[in-house]
Image (cartoon, helix red, strand yellow):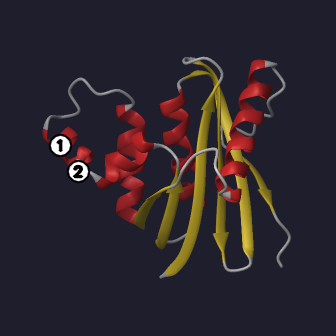
């Protein structure tokens, strides 16, 4: 099973408001950056969307170390929230569509969730924040690129 590291972040200008997410996928010498967003969303939805779109990029089941500064997202998968929410059929919960989609992707891949401190000294988290906030700003200004509803992908040249 291939081992992949993924960093993600989400941002929203207003809550709700124009939002963006960013992710960096790393496999060996390969690096891929993705970003995207929505015109009317919330910060938590963008925090969920980053890991979803990153995991969707993987072409086969992988062992994934997924780094996020979102306690909300990490806690869903590390503190048993998902199981409790599923038992109660997600009654009263927000973002059910995205939580369910992310849970399905986590059943395909072996995901280890790692909480990182946001806006600190982690260069990859900071880059994801830059991608997310830049896209949210482009959405707010009506300048965001549209790629068939999917994320914009930028691949770094192989080292």
The x and y percentages for residue 22 are 66, 46
Identify whether 79 is placed above or below 4. above
Residue placed most toward the observer, 8 or 89:
8
Let me know if residue 58 appears in the view. no
Q: Nearer the viewer, residue 74 or 82?
A: 74
Placement of 120 over or under 29, stated as above or below: above
Q: How many marks?
A: 2
The residues bearing labels 1 and 2 have C-alpha atoms spaced at a distance of: 6 Å
Q: Could you say which disc has been placed on residue 115 in the image?
A: none
Give coordinates of residue 29: x percent, y percent: 74, 79
Label 2 environment density (alpha carbons within 10 Å; few <14, some 14–19, many ≥20): few
Give me the residue at 38% from left, 41% from top. Answer: 99
In the image, 87 versus 130, the foreground residue is 130
Q: Are marks 1 and 2 in contact (CB under 8 Å)?
A: yes
**Classed neighbour count for the residue bearing mark 1: other residues with Cα under 10 Å, few (<14), some (14–19), many (≥20):** few
The local secondary structure at tag 1 comes to helix
At 73% from the left and 73% from the top, the residue drawn is: 30
Secondary structure of the residue carrying numbered label 2: loop
The residue wearing badge 1 is: 84
Q: Quadrant of residue 133?
A: top right
In the rendered image, residue 2, in percent from the top left (x then y), is placed at 53, 80
Q: Residue at x 47, y 82 (%)?
A: 1
Residue 63 at least partly seen: yes
Question: What x and y, as percent, mark residue 83?
Answer: 20, 48
Left or right position of 108 against 130: left
Residue farthest to the left, as pictured: 87
Residue 76 shown left or right of residue 61 in the figure: left
Q: Residue at x 62, y 33 (%)?
A: 11
Location of mark 2 (residue): 80
Q: Which quarter shows the C terminus? A: bottom right
Image position of 85 (left or right of 158): left
């Amino acid at each position: 099973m291939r081992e992949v590291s993924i960093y993600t972040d989400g941002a929203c200008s207003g809550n709700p408001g124009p939002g963006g997410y960013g992710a960096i996928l790393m496999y060996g010498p390969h690096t891929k950056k993705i970003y995207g967003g929505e015109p009317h969303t919330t910060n938590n939805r963008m925090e969920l969307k980053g890991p979803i779109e990153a995991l969707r990029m993987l072409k086969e089941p992988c062992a994934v170390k997924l780094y996020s500064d979102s306690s909300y997202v990490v806690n869903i998968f590390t503190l048993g929230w998902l199981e409790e929410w599923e038992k109660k059929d997600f009654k009263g919960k927000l973002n059910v569509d995205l939580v369910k989609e992310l849970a399905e992707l986590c059943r395909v891949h072996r995901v280890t969730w790692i909480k990182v401190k946001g806006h600190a000294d982690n260069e990859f988290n900071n880059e994801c924040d830059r991608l997310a906030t830049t896209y949210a700003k482009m959405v707010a200004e009506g300048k965001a690129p549209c790629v068939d509803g999917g994320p914009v992908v930028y691949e770094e040249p192989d080292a």
